[in-house]
Image (tube, helix red, strand yellow):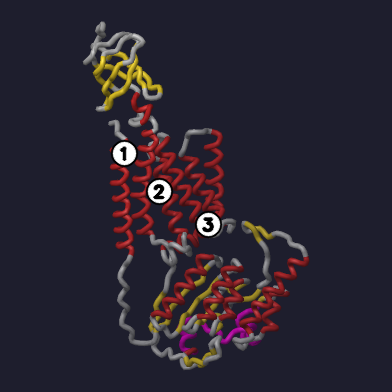
């Protein structure tokens, strides 16, 4: 079916209205009412976990958990930790939120055999209460520079700057927490590690407890000094423990940076792009390869989480445009939908999304956007083949009627679309004869009789 420009404009306006309506519905569906809090029979203890490498996702998780604890007036936030370390920026982010938390925070290296190494050592010593389970260790906090999991060499001056900055950062809160800054610094300068008993004896931690329940019993009635100097007595008799778990989005992003997932993403991404470059037109390998490669770059910490999200959204939009231009039997469209949903989930902290985009909103907005943008792009591409309806080009091929007889070499008058035009013809044409416009020169048109009309001698 051939659409005129006006019909195209009307369709575009309708599609835009449908898109706005769908987005509004999606936003309304995403605004869930506040969850009714369960009735509590005792003081609330919010349980959180740091399990695995510390990165932007865990930093956001800790921030959201501490904010939720403050909102619910919890008596204590208990962070159980088992980590080999992680990114410096994310560690500093977590430490800052622990120091600023209006709710006392206890960091507990557990279970038995766990470790709070490297970045975890900083987090442990920043807490109001630092505790460890038996057979755990902490320390070994010397900073290193690594790209994609590989340690890179640095010159001596830069090494000293990094070490001095890490030592100053550690001193800035261990002294105010009443712990042993001199011993703590050896974990940075000498990469020294400590067992739970050694850390307790060296005044690095406050308690050694066999289980979270034992830790809470030991903390009940204990007075702790907050970072601002105020003293708070912990009332933890018969506590109500509630877990604050990673959201689906945070759990997914945390899994991507695991070595197995990163390795698979890198291999699949490289193979997909190689296959597409060597066999152009296969489409599917290129789509999968592009998405996996962006995810792999994020897993290697070469792309910040928000930048990776924006890049995935751009990949999705590009695939929508290509779907409208080329026949891929829906492969490009599906790839674009996947890329855009992943990109939305990656937007953890941005000016537009604040706390992040939920999976429901991501799907509800992406699907109609994909369909509408593909339809509009196809209409735009098809409109380029339409014959112009206005201007000089729009006159060519139009039919009219002779109202002033035409003679060879002598101008006559022709009515086209209700307008009178001066006209010339290569042969005499009588008045009332249907004619077709051949070309336009200035304000003069050149015509010929339409098929079957014939010509009449004037």
Dot 1 lies on which element? helix
Q: Which of marks 1 and 2 is nearer the N terminus?
A: 1
Give x and y (percent) for residue 64: 45, 72
Dot 2 lies on which element? helix
Q: Earlier in the sequence, mark 1 or mark 3?
A: 1
Give the residues drawn in magenta, as a range. Answer: 194-218
Label 1 to label 2, Cα distance in Å?
25 Å
Give x and y (percent) for residue 445: 35, 20
Q: Which of marks 3 and 2 is nearer the N terminus?
A: 3
Residue indicated by mark 3: 307
Q: Which of marks 1 and 2 is in front?
A: 1
Q: Does the magenta stretch include residue 311?
A: no
Residue for point 31% across, 79% down: 38
Residue for point 38% across, 56% down: 362
Occupied quadrant, residue 399 = top left
Label 1 to label 3, Cα distance in Å?
36 Å
- Say the numbered circle drawn on residue 337: 2
Question: Decide: marks 3, 2 in contact (CB < 8 A)?
Answer: no
Give x and y (percent) for residue 383: 36, 34
Assign the C terminus to one quadrant of the image: top left
Crowding around mark 3 (Cα neighbors within 10 Å: few <14, some 14 to 19, many 20+) is some
Label 3 to label 2, Cα distance in Å?
18 Å
Question: Decide: marks 1, 2 in contact (CB < 8 A)?
Answer: no
Q: In this view, does 311 lie above or below 108?
A: above
Assign the N terminus to one quadrant of the image: top left
Residue 128 visible somewhere in the drawing: yes
Question: Decide: marks 1, 3 in contact (CB < 8 A)?
Answer: no
Residue 197 visible somewhere in the drawing: no
Crowding around mark 2 (Cα neighbors within 10 Å: few <14, some 14 to 19, many 20+) is many
- Say the numbered circle drawn on residue 8: 1
């Amino acid at each position: 079916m051939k659409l005129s420009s006006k019909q195209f404009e009307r369709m575009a306006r309708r599609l835009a209205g449908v898109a706005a309506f769908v987005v509004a519905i999606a936003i309304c569906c995403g605004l869930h009412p506040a969850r009714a809090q369960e009735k509590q029979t005792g003081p609330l203890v919010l349980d959180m976990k740091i399990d695995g490498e510390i990165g932007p996702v865990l930093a956001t998780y800790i921030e959201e958990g501490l904010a939720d604890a403050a909102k619910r007036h919890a008596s204590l936030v208990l962070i159980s930790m088992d980590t080999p370390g992680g990114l410096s920026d994310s560690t500093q982010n977590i430490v800052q939120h622990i120091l600023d938390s209006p709710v006392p925070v206890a960091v507990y290296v557990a279970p038995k055999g766990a470790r709070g190494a490297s970045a975890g050592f900083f987090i442990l010593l920043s807490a109001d209460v630092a505790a460890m389970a038996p057979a755990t260790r902490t320390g070994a906090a010397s900073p290193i520079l690594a790209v994609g999991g590989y340690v890179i060499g640095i010159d001596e001056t830069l090494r000293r700057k990094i070490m001095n900055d890490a030592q100053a950062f550690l001193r800035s809160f261990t002294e105010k927490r009443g712990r042993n800054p001199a011993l703590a610094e050896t974990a940075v300068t000498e990469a020294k590690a400590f067992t739970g008993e050694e850390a307790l004896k060296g005044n690095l931690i406050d308690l050694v407890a066999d289980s979270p329940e034992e830790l809470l019993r030991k903390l009940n009635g204990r007075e702790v000094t907050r970072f601002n100097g105020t003293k708070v007595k912990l009332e933890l008799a018969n506590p109500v423990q509630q877990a604050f778990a990673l959201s689906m989005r945070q759990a997914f992003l945390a899994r991507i940076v695991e070595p197995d997932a990163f390795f698979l993403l890198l291999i699949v991404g490289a193979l997909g792009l190689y296959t597409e470059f060597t066999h152009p037109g296969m489409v599917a390998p290129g789509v999968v390869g592009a998405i996996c490669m962006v995810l792999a770059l994020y897993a290697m910490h070469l792309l910040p989480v928000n930048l990776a999200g924006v890049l995935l959204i751009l990949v999705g939009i590009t695939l929508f445009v290509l779907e409208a231009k080329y026949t891929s039997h829906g492969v490009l469209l599906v790839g674009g939908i996947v890329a855009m949903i992943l990109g939305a989930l990656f937007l953890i902290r941005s000016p537009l999304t604040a706390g992040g985009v939920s999976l429901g909103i991501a799907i509800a907005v992406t699907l109609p956007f994909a369909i509408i943008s593909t339809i509009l792009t196809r209409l735009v591409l098809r409109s380029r083949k339409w014959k112009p309806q206005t201007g000089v080009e729009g006159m060519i091929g139009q039919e009219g009627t002779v109202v002033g007889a035409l003679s060879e070499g002598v101008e006559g008058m022709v009515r086209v679309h209700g307008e009178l035009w001066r006209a010339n013809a290569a042969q005499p044409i009588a008045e009332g004869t249907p004619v077709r416009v051949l070309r336009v020169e200035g304000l003069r048109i050149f015509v010929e009789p339409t098929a079957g009309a014939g010509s009449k001698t004037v």
